Image (tube, rainbow, N blue to C red):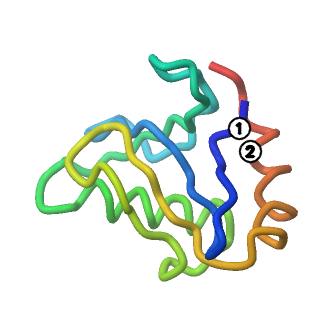
């Protein structure tokens, strides 16, 4: 199960976000309703005016030591299920992110 998809301009990350949670965290990897792998994340921010999306980008940038500018929500701005683009060389990003994702629990 891999929530990352290689693209020419970087990687796409499929995830499910829980806003208004008790803490900001990358929860783990799970199967979505259609059987595809998604990263589960939670943020304390409320889902209004893009606050939860901004908190998600900040969480991922800090957790993965990436510049915030390389992360952007490209699908699901107002939905719990989102697709984020991680800009950069796909090979370099894979080498960096695969071990971090593999270390997350399966939930």
Quickly name the residue at label 1. 2
Say whether marks 2 and 1 touch (CB < 8 Å): yes
Label 2 crowd bin: few (<14), some (14–19), many (20+), radius 10 Å:
some
The crowding category of the residue bearing disc 1, from other C-alpha atoms within 10 Å (few below 14, some 14 to 19, many at least 20), is: some
Q: Quadrant of residue 65?
A: bottom right
Q: Which quadrant of the figure contains the C terminus?
A: top right
Up-down: is 88 above or below 53?
Answer: below
Q: Position of residue 16 (x, y in %)?
A: 43, 36
Which of marks 1 and 2 precedes in the sequence?
Answer: 1
Please tell me which residue lies in front, 66 or 11.
11
Residue at the image point whose x is 69% and y is 23% from the top: 106
Nearer to us in this view, 9 or 17: 9
Q: Percent position (x, y) of residue 17?
A: 39, 40
| SS label for mark 2 | helix
Looking at the rendered image, the quarter that the N terminus falls into is top right
**99 over 50 or under it: above or below:** above
Residue indicated by mark 2: 101
Q: Is residue 72 left or right of residue 12?
A: left
Nearest to viewer (mark 2 / mark 1): 1
């Amino acid at each position: 199960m891999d929530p990352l998809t290689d693209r020419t301009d970087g990687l796409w990350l499929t995830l499910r976000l829980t806003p208004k949670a008790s803490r900001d965290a990358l929860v783990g990897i799970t199967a979505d309703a259609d059987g595809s792998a998604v990263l589960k994340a939670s943020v304390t921010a409320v889902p209004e005016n893009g606050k939860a999306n901004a908190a998600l980008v900040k969480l991922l940038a800090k957790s993965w030591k990436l510049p915030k500018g390389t992360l952007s929500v490209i699908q699901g701005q107002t939905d719990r299920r989102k697709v984020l683009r991680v800009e950069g060389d796909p090979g370099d990003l894979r080498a960096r992110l695969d071990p971090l994702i593999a270390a997350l629990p399966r939930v």
